[in-house]
Image (cartoon, rainbow, N blue to C red):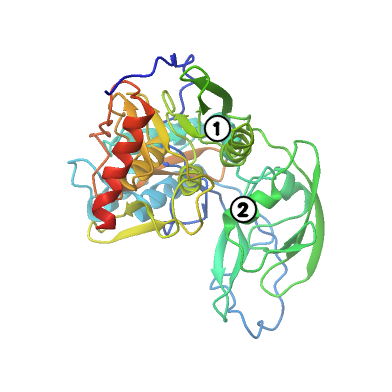
Amino acid sequence: MSGYLCLKLSPPPPPPPLPALSKPHLPLRNTLLGAALSFGLLFSFPSVSALQLPSQPCPHRQPPQETLQTAPEVVTNQGLVEEAWQIVNDTFLDTGRHRWSQDTWQLKREGILSNSIQTRSKAHQIIKRMLSSLGDPYTRFLSPDEFSKMARYDMTGVGINLKEVPDENGDLRLEVLGIILDGPAYSAGVRQGDEILAVNNVEVKGKSAFEVSSLLQGPNGTSVTIQVKHGYCGPVESIEVQRQLVARTPVFYRLEQLDSGVTPVGYIRLKEFNALARKDLVIAMKRLQDMGASYFILDLRDNLGGLVQAGIEIAKLFLNEGDTVIYTVGRDPQLQKAIVSDTSPLIQAPVVVLVNDKTASASEIVASALHDNCRAVLVGKRTYGKGLIQSVFELDDGSGVVITVGKYVTPHHNDINGNGIEPDFQKLPAWDDISQHLKKCSMPQQG
């Protein structure tokens, strides 16, 4: 007979609310890959390179189409407003009923820039009003102080983000696509556009941006040696960079003994998807396995999201190779990009994911991926319904803008935004019922 387990799992006090941000691959200007925040965040930074270009072009690489400045130009108030306008023009996705178009946006530019902007404060006010006119609650302006707080989403701990670029043989090489001004890497001499060749003497050719970001991570205050090629033709330099990771661990775990000690269950609470989330979750899962856990509970209640890329990589820990994690949709609704797991699962044990009405964005990516691929049952309340992707761009004066650039749909092609995800159970069922539910879920795929 079916029953319910008497496991008291009341949610802890909710973490501090995150700004409404979730980071799949989208063609964004100067986008910090992997930093998609759970609202859907991607980071983007202004060009700050001071690169020495060779007099002759490299034989195997195309020279840039524009001349790089040897020093950043002083930004004017008009230039700052125009920079924000251009980012919207290039990347914004209208997910409401406002019928935004580039033609009407061009008219707004002409109206805004027709008058002189005397102060930086006035420029910021104009950008705020300009973004507000889009009618998107997630697209907004960030003051320099607000933007600086985004450092906890730095995936590397040294203040850079990486772009995967295929070489002439089809192998991946990695370039610095975004860099935080006055961050550890920039202060040590790394520049935007540099190619990463090795991390601590480990060659990175063929590795993904996320893999190399993980290699760059380490305890706060320790150093990492990065071998870079400046520009697109050298020189090559080894640079020692001191890590300054702002993020704190969002993972808490313990072993529960249920059914009078017969059933050991690994309980993991994930508060947000920051730069440490995947790394610390792997540690927790392995330790719980070593302690004898035969089932797992992943608690995503009150988790409002964070880095989308972290959510995607965490979902892959539970999925089989080839399983779809999520689909992303940009300006053309007919073009859906599938993000697919490329690794074997870390665990095979049945999983319960706890959700509620504050489970949002990157949390919903994980919950839907595990649910639709028959790896977990969802228990609790319908999730929040945040299925939009935002990108965070830094402006030239250290302020920033958060822009909605896409949306995602579940492996079963359900639109999360505004709908949320309905759980399988409202209360935690008996483990036999969980196992039976997952078997029935898998049967259509097997037959």
Q: Which residue is mark 1?
A: 293
Q: Which residue is mark 2?
A: 73
As rendered, which of 182 and 66 lies closer to the eye?
A: 182
**Which residue does the image show at 51% across and 24% down from the upper left?**
262
Mark 1: give few (<14), some (14-19) or many (20+) Cα within 10 Å: many
Image quarter of residue 362 = top left
- Above or below — where is 32 with respect to 19? below
Q: Quadrant of the N terminus?
A: top left
As rendered, which of 174 and 217 lies closer to the eye?
A: 217
Residue 170 % position (x, y):
54, 77
Question: What's the CA distance linking mark 2 and mark 1?
Answer: 57 Å
Discs 2/1, front: 1
Mark 2: give few (<14), some (14-19) or many (20+) Cα within 10 Å: few
As rendered, which of 172 and 367 lies closer to the eye?
A: 367
**Which residue does the image show at 64% across and 58% down from the upper left?**
192
Residue 447 visible? The answer is yes
* Secondary structure state at the residue bearing disc 2: loop
The answer to whether residue 276 is left or right of residue 17 is right
**Which residue does the image show at 19% across and 41% down from the upper left?**
98
Residues marked 2 and 1 touching at CB (< 8 Å):
no
The amino acid pointed to by label 2 is: Glu
